Image (cartoon, rainbow, N blue to C red):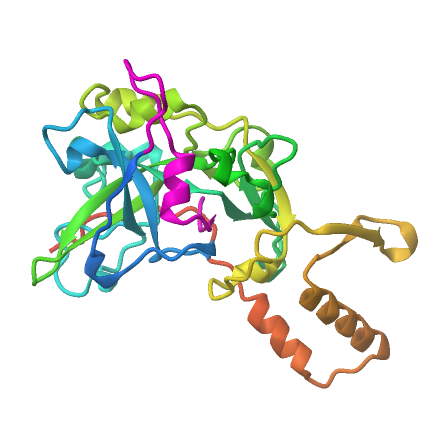
């Protein structure tokens, strides 16, 4: 599954990180950022991107110019959560869950098959995505949260932007996910571009976190094949999607559970603390955030004193640790029956 992502780069930095090579050209070429009105919705860099937010995605330039080179690319801001092209009325009220779509039934879905047939394939960009461990029985609010990203050079730290060296050519390796997009028109003729993330059954070590994962494109060749719909037909493109073996992850604070929390603490790794229960059992996890550390200290003091009176700290906990969105897979939505 994929319910939250992190993308804090400005468009110019994204262009630098998304350079690609073309036949006959010696230097890599950056994709051009093409802004869209999107019914008034704008891209805002965020440490906690949620469905209905707008983020830039990669698409083939031929979607906007038939005469363009099929290998050329554009960066286009689109809303996360595909709005069906046939929907009438407020785009926020189509009633379908379209943040993710399952690869297994994609080609036969009445909702997703048309965009697939039209070649409307895109690559969702992010520094990483958040996932909650759901393979073990536990309350939603107790599920550990993890930040998943691509391998980086040793000197690059995902939680420290000062190590990314964007000014010298962009050394950061973005996480690139295969997706589909569609175009919806409101009653005034304004267009809204929106996308969905393709997911499939997890394989390998990540299966200890979640049984589904997004279709990550690990190489430049995979990105090129997925975007170039004229050269690579839909069936072949779907067959090229394989579970990622390269992605890395670390645990983060559950403050990311609440989509309103946009703090730069969202993607900070947790530090291992001293063992609990007198030295037995797993190590306690202590967040780097001073605010969270203070809250945990106060909570422990209250528990030790046996105090049951509701406190301000408990209210903060409720705000910071809201239940994450349901991570259980849902069947692909379909066109409502008349």
Question: Which of 265 and 5 lies nearest the eye of the viewer?
Answer: 265
In the rendered image, residue 89, in percent from the top left (x then y), is placed at: 14, 64
Q: Is residue 149 left or right of residue 105?
A: right
x and y percentages locating residue 82 in the rendered image: 26, 49
Residue occupying the far left of the picture: 188
Q: Is residue 308 above or below residue 137?
A: below
Extreme residue toward the front, this view: 168
What residue do we see at 16% from left, 52% from top? 184
Q: Which residue, as the protein is rendered here, is positioned at the far right?
A: 278
Outermost bottom residue: 309
Quadrant holding the C terminus: bottom left
Can you tell which quarter of the image residue 196 is in?
top left
Question: How many dots with numbers?
Answer: 0
* Magenta span dominant secondary structure: loop
Q: Per the image, is 28 magenta?
A: yes
Residue at 58%, 32% (x, y): give it: 152
Q: What residue do we see at 82% from left, 79% from top? A: 306
Question: Residue shown at 74%/70% (left/top)?
Answer: 294
In this rendering, would 138 be left or right of 298?
left
**Residue 332 seen from this side:** no
Q: Is residue 138 magenta?
A: no
Residue 254 position by quadrant: bottom right
Image coordinates for residue 329, horizontal then vertical, percent: 42, 46
Left or right: residue 265 compared with residue 108: right
Q: Is residue 273 visible?
A: yes
Instruction: Provide the residue span drawn in magenta.
Output: 1-30
| Above or below, 333 relative to 139 | above
């Amino acid at each position: 599954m994929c319910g939250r992502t992190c993308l804090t780069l400005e468009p110019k930095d994204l262009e630098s990180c998304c350079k690609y090579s073309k036949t006959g050209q010696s230097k890599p070429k950056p994709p051009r950022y093409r802004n869209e009105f999107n019914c008034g919705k704008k891209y805002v860099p965020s440490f906690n991107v949620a469905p209905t937010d707008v983020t830039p995605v990669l698409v083939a330039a031929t979607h906007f110019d038939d005469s363009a080179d099929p290998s050329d690319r554009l960066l286009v801001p689109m809303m996360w959560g595909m709005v069906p092209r046939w929907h009438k009325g407020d785009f926020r009220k189509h009633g379908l869950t379209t943040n993710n779509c399952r690869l297994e039934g994609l080609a036969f879905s009445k909702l997703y098959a048309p965009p697939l047939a039209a070649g409307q394939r895109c690559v969702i960009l992010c520094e990483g995505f958040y996932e909650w461990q759901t393979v073990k029985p536990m309350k939603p609010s107790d599920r550990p949260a993890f930040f998943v990203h691509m391998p980086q050079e040793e000197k690059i730290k995902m939680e420290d932007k000062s190590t990314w060296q964007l000014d010298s050519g962009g050394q950061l390796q973005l996480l690139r996910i295969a997706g589909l997009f569609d175009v919806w028109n409101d009653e005034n003729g304004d267009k809204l571009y929106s996308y969905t993330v393709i997911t499939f059954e997890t394989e390998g070590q990540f299966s200890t976190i979640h049984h589904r994962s997004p279709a990550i494109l690990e190489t430049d060749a995979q990105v090129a094949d997925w975007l170039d719909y004229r050269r690579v037909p839909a069936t072949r493109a779907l067959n090229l999607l394989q579970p990622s073996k390269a992605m890395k992850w670390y645990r983060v604070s559950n403050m990311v559970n609440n989509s309103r929390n946009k703090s730069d603490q969202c993607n900070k790794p947790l530090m291992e603390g001293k063992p609990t229960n007198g030295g037995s059992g797993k190590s306690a996890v202590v967040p780097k955030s001073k605010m969270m550390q203070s809250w945990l200290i106060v909570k422990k003091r209250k528990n030790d004193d046996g105090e049951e009176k509701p406190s301000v700290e408990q209210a903060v906990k409720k705000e910071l640790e809201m239940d994450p969105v349901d991570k259980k897979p849902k069947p692909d939505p379909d066109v409502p029956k008349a």
